[in-house]
Amino acid sequence: MAFRMTVQTLLVLQALLRDPGRELYGLELSEETGLLPGTAYPILMRLENEGWVSSRWEDIDPAAEKRPARRYYRLTASGATQASAAMVNARRPARAALRGLAGEGGHA
Amino acid sequence: MTRTRLLALLTFVIPAAGAIGAAVDGRGGAVNGVLLGAVVFVATAVGFDVAPEWGRGQARFRQGPAVAGVRFRAAAPSAIPGAGMRMAAWLMPGASGQEWLAEALSIMFEAAPEVRRSIKRSYLLAAGQVLVVTWTAALTGRLRAVRDAKLPGGGR
């Protein structure tokens, strides 16, 4: 893994992992993560460069649909596995910290 | 002087000051100059795109940009990427700038009018990161191709 696993990256991965087979476009991702689309874009680019995510442009006639084509993102098979592992790893320190806090609370 | 003009002026003045600092201080000054230039570029781009007053040069953007071969004349001005976004896209390698711009347009087109400005600002604020990611990908890809070509059998 060549990129930093930030909270924003985890939010994007979590949204994509809810249904790994489902494709999401920018606005849907934004609604699910609470991140603005511009913020999510470089994260998706990094994930795509690493092969975790694949993207495709919607195949529509923009003039007929009266809107531009959307760009859809989905997790790749290997990306889904790695993303699940990253989510588990991200939760581990939080659990350890909570256990530590509970321990300190017990001593007080 | 409008805010947009002031920011445009600062774009040239501050990096120039950084370059002078680089000449005087050496390496540290160069880094400061580049950082200042980057900060002012983003600030200017935000100023261009979210400035409430539309300059004369913005009039042609009201017609709508031709993205992916389609000119969206019906789009509201707030849904159209402005000069700052076009400038950032122009700085990106290959087709990645056009892709970034096309996705921004696609999202702003469908977004509610009241959130378009914040979406536009988010794209501009993240433009620096996108520039780094796209150029890194382009350069590493190019370097890999050069290295593979030098290997016996063309890297196969």
Image (cartoon, rainbow, N blue to C red):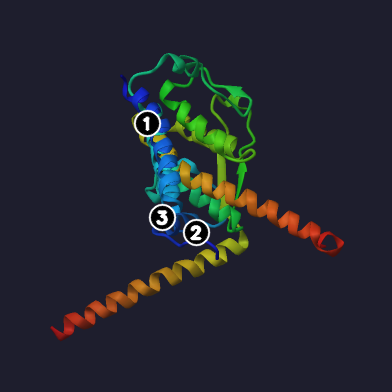
Residue that badge 1 annotates: B10
B143 displayed left or right of B48? right
Q: Which residue is drawn at 40% across and 51% down?
A: A33
Give the spatial CA distance, label 3 vs label 1: 32 Å
Residue B154 image point, x, y percent = 83, 59
B45 displayed left or right of A54? left
> Contact (CB < 8 A) between labels 3 and 1?
no
Work out whether disc 2 and disc 3 sit on a shared chain: yes
Mark 3 is on which residue type? Gln
Residue that badge 2 annotates: A17
Residue that badge 3 annotates: A8
Residue most toward the left? A108
Residue most toward the bottom? A107
The chain letter under disc 2 is: A
Neighbour tally class for label 1: few under 14, some 14-19, many 20 plus, Cα within 10 Å:
some
Q: Residue B107 carries which label?
A: none
> Contact (CB < 8 A) between labels 2 and 3?
no
**Nearer-the-camera pick, B134 or A52:** B134
Give the spatial CA distance, label 1 vs label 2: 44 Å
The chain letter under disc 3 is: A
How many marks overall?
3
Location of the N terminus of chain B by quadrant is top left
